[in-house]
């Protein structure tokens, strides 16, 4: 097995923030799917009804984005070859989720969250794409497998 190039100084802060990002996203997904009262109490009844009644393909994209992102972050930390692929799957699933919630849904998510909901989704998609590009960059440099 060829030796890897040294990891840049920013690897650990980015990798650990990615791990934390996807752990929080996973918690949000699971707590929303199970509609746990301590968590849903943080939202309006309209918001809870909206997010607990999404179509299966949207829930699937949400779950895929979160799980693939978490696996991608773990893979990056443990230097597994598939980290960039997992992060790409996560980014594309989040992009689909964002497109559906902000443009294709009827009613759109903004009807229950306001413009902030759209901004959060677009920001999450940008973060997902940035983490995918980061993993690809590290792979191209030989810093990760």
Image (spheres, rainbow, N blue to C red):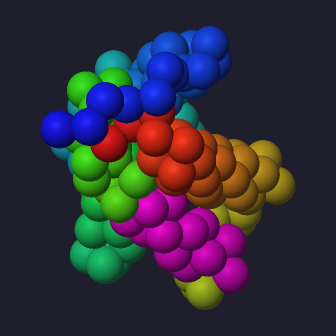
Q: Main secondary structure of the magenta part?
A: helix
Vertical relation: 117 (above or below) 92:
above
Vertical relation: 118 (above or below) 104:
above
Residue shown at the point (26%, 48%) measured from the top left: 81
Residue shown at the point (40%, 53%) measured from the top left: 84
Q: Quadrant of the C terminus?
A: top left
* Side (left or right) of 105 relative to 34: right
* Side (left or right) of 11 relative to 60: right
Confirm whether the magenta stretch covers residue 31: no
Residue shown at the point (68%, 53%) measured from the top left: 126
Vertical relation: 70 (above or below) 37:
below
Nearer to us in this view, 44 or 127: 127
Nearer to us in this view, 8 or 97: 8
Residue found at the very far right of the displayed protein: 115
Nearer to us in this view, 110 or 27: 27
- Disc tally is 0
Confirm whether the magenta stretch covers residue 91: yes
Vertical relation: 70 (above or below) 106:
above
**Picture coordinates of residue 1 (x, y %)?**
17, 38
* Side (left or right) of 87 relative to 33: right
The boundaries of the magenta stretch are: 88-103
**Picture coordinates of residue 137 (x, y %)?**
58, 48
Nearer to us in this view, 128 or 8: 8
Residue shown at the point (51%, 75%) measured from the top left: 96
Decide if residue 89 is in sight here. Answer: yes
**Picture coordinates of residue 3 (x, y %)?**
31, 30
Decide if residue 24 is in sight here. Answer: no
């Amino acid at each position: 097995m060829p030796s890897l190039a040294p990891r840049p100084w920013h690897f650990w802060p980015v990798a650990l923030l990615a791990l934390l990002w996807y752990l929080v996203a996973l918690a949000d997904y699971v707590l929303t799917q199970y509609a746990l009262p301590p968590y849903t109490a943080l939202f309006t009844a309209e918001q809870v009804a909206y997010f607990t009644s999404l179509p299966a393909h949207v829930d699937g994209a949400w779950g895929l984005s979160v799980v693939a992102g978490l696996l991608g972050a773990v893979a990056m930390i443990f230097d597994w070859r598939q980290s960039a692929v997992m992060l790409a799957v996560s980014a594309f699933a989040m992009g689909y989720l964002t497109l559906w919630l902000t443009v294709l849904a009827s009613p759109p998510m903004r009807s229950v969250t306001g413009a902030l909901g759209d901004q959060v989704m677009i920001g999450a998609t940008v973060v997902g794409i940035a983490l995918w590009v980061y993993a690809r960059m590290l792979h191209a440099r030989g810093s990760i497998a």
